[in-house]
Image: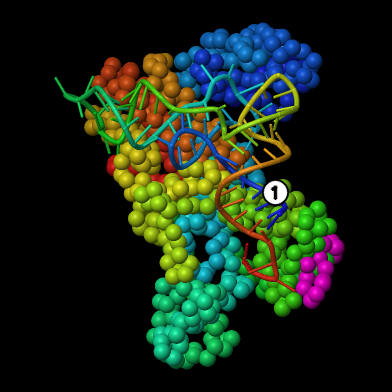
Amino acid sequence: MKSYLRPFLLEALSALNIAAPDEITLELPRNPEHGDLSTNLAMTLAKAEKKNPRELANALVESLKSRIDAAVVTDISIAGAGFINFKFADTFYGSRLKSVSEAGEAYGKNAKGTGIRVNVEYVSANPTGLLHVGHGRNAAIGDTVANILHWNGYDVTREYYFNNAGNQMNNLGKSVHKRYLECLDAAKFPFPTVEEDDSLYRGEYITEMGKSLADKHGSALQEASEENLTQCRKAGEEWCFAAITKTMVRMNIRHDVYFNEDSLYSEGKVADTIQKLKEHGVAYEKDGATWLALSKMGMQDDRVMIKSSGEPTYRLPDIAYHHDKLARRKFDMVVDILGADHIATYPDVLAAVKALGENPEKVRVLIYQFVTLMHNGEQVKMSKRTGKAYTLDDLLEEFGEDVTRFFFVMRSNNTHLEFDIGLASEQSDKNPVFYLQYAHARISSVLRQAEERGVTVNASTIAGAETTLLVHPSEIDLLKLILRFPETVARAGEILEPQVIAEFLREVAAAFHKFYHDCRILGEAESLTNARFALAFAAKTVLRNGLQILGISAPEKM
RNA sequence: GCACCCAUAGCUCAACUGGAUAGAGCAUUUGACUACGAAUCAAAAGGCUAGGAGUUCGAAUCUCUUUGGGUGCACCA
């Protein structure tokens, strides 16, 4: 609809000698009495043109009426302070249904991002343990955003920044070694309590690793030498990596690139970065440490990049990593998915990237708020002390990948997410995932029955259908939604919010259920049945494609 | 103490980045299966968008401020 009107609006503007604004906003009015689309063009231009908005609107409407086919747009009117409202003919929607069958599995895609290489980095959990619930939201958002960008035509690389260097990894090695010792002789080498050493990892998986090392090597690794600790660390890293990828696969997620942090060191990129920062005058030495001069870049305090001990802080490899993505690998756009606890860290990195001559606007940082697990109205606490926490695997085990993924993206990124365990396990109308899937299964069921009656419904059904027969309000509502899918994908691609897709699909499902309730499909006159087959098939296409973007299955039966 | 995020129906959240009468789901109440899946549909009720001031044709949205939550403020990541 919008794409139908835009050219006419541009023509009308130029006929009136008015420069077109960058963006012509066309909106769906909340109130259906205001027509099917509306624009505030006259109001936004009134000031610059020094005209009364309504006067301007009048001129525009006159000009539009002479250009637009009255059989397609049945009414163009002015309302309120100067809104121009458009009313489309009911038959217009049906006539556009062909676009669904022509595109098929690609319906909803656009080519906006053609030729633009984008790197989406998500999950990126340290290989020091199992993925927990928070990582789940990161994973679901990241993967869905990657899908959304793909549907917008971008050339997408899915990347996992594998944080396998640094202090946390050493702590992992130490923890495994202590468990290993405990396994050899618990009396002689008791595992330290939290009070004694709070840097240790305490999950059961550490004990498991210690045990397997003890089985394999006996007492050979007993000495806490660097060599032995390295071996423990390696074993821990491998174990965690295997566990993490397994969880990802289960969630229907496959990264294209696992970028190892330690490669930044081994390939000299960290050293190179610090060198370049110094050349640009934004790094200096003080008190035996190397600092990033953020105060020179309009920020408050300088921060340490290399500690006086010689170890880098997280900041330095992060800068090197982003510089690598932009300068060496030349991505046109870089998307980072970060939890709210990292909100204060990325401006440093962006400032440094800018100092290195790259455009920080190429980096889009998506911050998501935390997840609280709720059960019977009470918060499920996670315990650091015992190392026991609800893992992502637990959720997948209990609810399956569809429900888990959906719950993580059904709220906008920037709102706290309540993951209601009771609701997720409910296989009923309360559970929004089933609502969507049920609509898809219901359509599938009808199409199966058509098949039994010797009618195969497919894309050519739409091409051959008499769509002018689709005039029931429920049919029109469903048609409108189906046709809005491409612009919804485009919008999701602009704001990078998966929730937009989830909410849209809920609307489509609701419109289908209502249509199904109000209008019979089977057993009507052949032409009407066929038209409704076409509509149902189009709805199924939208649901299937949309669910695919969310990484959720579209079942034929439930 | 300083910075960032948030506050919308009883609960969980929307509101197309400034548009017209703020919308959904759940919960509550009440209706609809002798025809395609009732995991569905329909109806009712529910609001001074936390409080206050400002910006303009127009504010839940932008600015300031008060209150009440979250997060971060290391030579941790």
What residue do we see at 48% from left, 55% from top?
Answer: A136
Residue shown at the point (31%, 44%) measured from the top left: A427
In the image, is residue A333 above or below residue A2?
below
Residue A438 in percent (x, y) is at 33, 38
Q: Which residues are magenta?
A: A279-291
Q: Is residue A304 left or right of residue A84?
A: right
Q: Position of residue A373 (x, y in %)?
A: 43, 53
Magenta-colored stretch includes residue A286? yes
Q: Would you say B12 lies left or right of A151 here?
A: left
Q: Quadrant of the C terminus of chain A?
A: top left
Tell me the quarter of the picture where residue A429 sits. top left
Residue A54 point in image, percent of width and height: 69, 11
Q: Nearer the viewer, residue A386 or A150?
A: A386
Q: Mark 1 highlights which residue? A: A362
Disc 1: CA contacts within 10 A as few (<14), some (14-19) or many (>=20):
some
Whether the magenta-drawn stretch holds residue A391 is answered as no
Comparing A174 with A36, the one in front is A174
Residue A98 visible to the viewer: no
- Identify residue type, mark 1: Lys
Frontmost residue, A295 versus A69: A295
The x, y position of residue A396, in whole percent, is: 39, 56
Residue drawn at (40%, 51%) of the image: A378
Q: Secondary structure at mark 1?
A: helix
User: Up-down: is A260 above or below B9?
Assistant: below
Chain ID at mark 1: A
Quarter of the image with the N terminus of chain A in it: top right
Q: How many marks?
A: 1
